[in-house]
Image: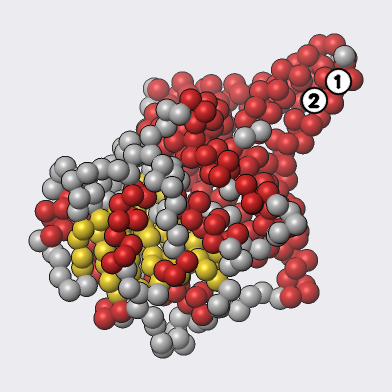
Amino acid sequence: MIFLVKLIFWISLFIVIYTFIGYGIVLFLITRIKRIFRGKRKITDIHKKKDWPEITLLIAAYNEEDDILDKLENSIQLDYPKEKLNILFVTDGSTDRTTKLLREKAGENIIVEHSDERKGKIAAVDRVMPLVKSPIIIYTDANTFLNKSALKNIVRHFDDEKVGAVAGEKRIEQNTSDHAAGAGEGFYWKYESKLKKWDDELVSVVGAAGELFAIRTELYKPVSSDTIIEDFVMTVGISLAGYRVAYEPEAYATERSSANSKEERKRKVRIAAGGIQAITRLKSAFNFFNNFWLSFAFISHRVLRWTITPFALIILLFTNIYLWQTTQSSIYEFLAYGQILFYLLAIIGLLFESKEIRIKAFFIPYYFCMMNISVIQGIFRHFKGSQSVVWERAKRAQKSI
């Protein structure tokens, strides 16, 4: 009995460490070895490139009247030849002034498409894709703002015919008054961005964030209308088709953190439900014989986080306590105290959050626990079939002054 518990404990410990730390270390080492033999990939210098292709910036917006004019202005001011830039807004289902405000600014290269029926983001995007005639399409969200050189930094990657898509970087606007989830979200995305950079060096980015990514228009394939995280499914599909999804950290979309932990948890549960849905539909990504390194990255970076690891954390805690009490081994005692301390910090973080006490030392344990609990909720929501494809908008923090 004790042998079995020990086996379960060590397997669980390995899964947890590998998922959150080990994969990053392995990825770092592999990419460094790869650089020795192949060097770094060469990317076109935006200051030397003169022949820029026509592109379409597609922005799906739902009830974004507070930010939409700022988004439009941000899009217009981006550094890209104006005659080559088309800006396409789709506002399906919006019931506020979003569509009206945009139509007042519409022109030759600023197009606004609206349908009263709300079917979800992917349905809205699919509806307007026939309007896109440019060879490259760039997707971005209405509540995110791009850096001035974002478009050129993305488009330069398409000089490589093997690149089918490009993932930009997501950044969280940090304020000193951020709540625990907001600060934790910022830290999470910094680490996630580093993993994406190394994924790209290894083989291909495993799923782009919807805040900013681009694809070759000819590679667009409609996904099922009930797809929850379409950006992930679309870009993994492009990788599976034999193209590379590049990563460009100098093209970034900045957005405000969630207004509070409740709003951030709402987002995480939905993303987790979408992650499980995507895993069940991307079965070919598990075929190591088709592309070993892509399958390795897909399972290590995505599948473990969205399936086994949150449950392994629970198993790890209880098997550790059992072994500590039954074997009296110092190693189990040390690990048990470490786990108990970590979860106590998370609980203190939760209490401080409710009292609006901002001590960042407790943010990461709290955010880590909230994230994994949200994944478990998302898994159950998926299998219950209760996750709608239509986004329930998460409230964002107030604009920084």
Is residue 224 in view? yes
Is residue 183 in view? no
Q: Is residue 295 left or right of residue 51?
A: right
Which quarter of the image is occupied by the N terminus? top right
Q: Quadrant of residue 336?
A: top right
The crowd level at tag 1 (other Cα within 10 Å; few <14, some 14-19, many 20+) is few
- Which kind of residue does numbered mark 2 sit on? Ile
Q: Residue at x 13, y 48 (%)?
A: 97
Q: Quadrant of residue 207?
A: bottom right
Q: Residue at x 80, y 25 (%)?
A: 8
Work out whether 296 lies above or below 332: below
Q: Which of these two is toward me, 206 or 67?
A: 206
Q: Which of these two is toward me, 354 or 311?
A: 311
Q: Is residue 235 left or right of residue 147?
A: right
- Which kind of residue does numbered mark 1 sit on? Leu
Q: Residue at x 28, y 67 (%)?
A: 131
Query: Badges 2 and 1: C-beta atoms under 8 Å apart?
Result: yes
Q: Tell me residue 10's x, y (percent).
A: 81, 30
Work out whether 330 lies above or below 390: above
Q: Which of these two is toward me, 101 or 174?
A: 101
Report how many numbered discs are placed on residues in the image.
Answer: 2
Q: Tell me residue 5's x, y (percent).
A: 82, 19
Q: Which mark is residue 8?
A: 2
Work out whether 173 lies above or below 323: below
Give SS at disc 2.
helix
Q: Which mark is residue 4?
A: 1
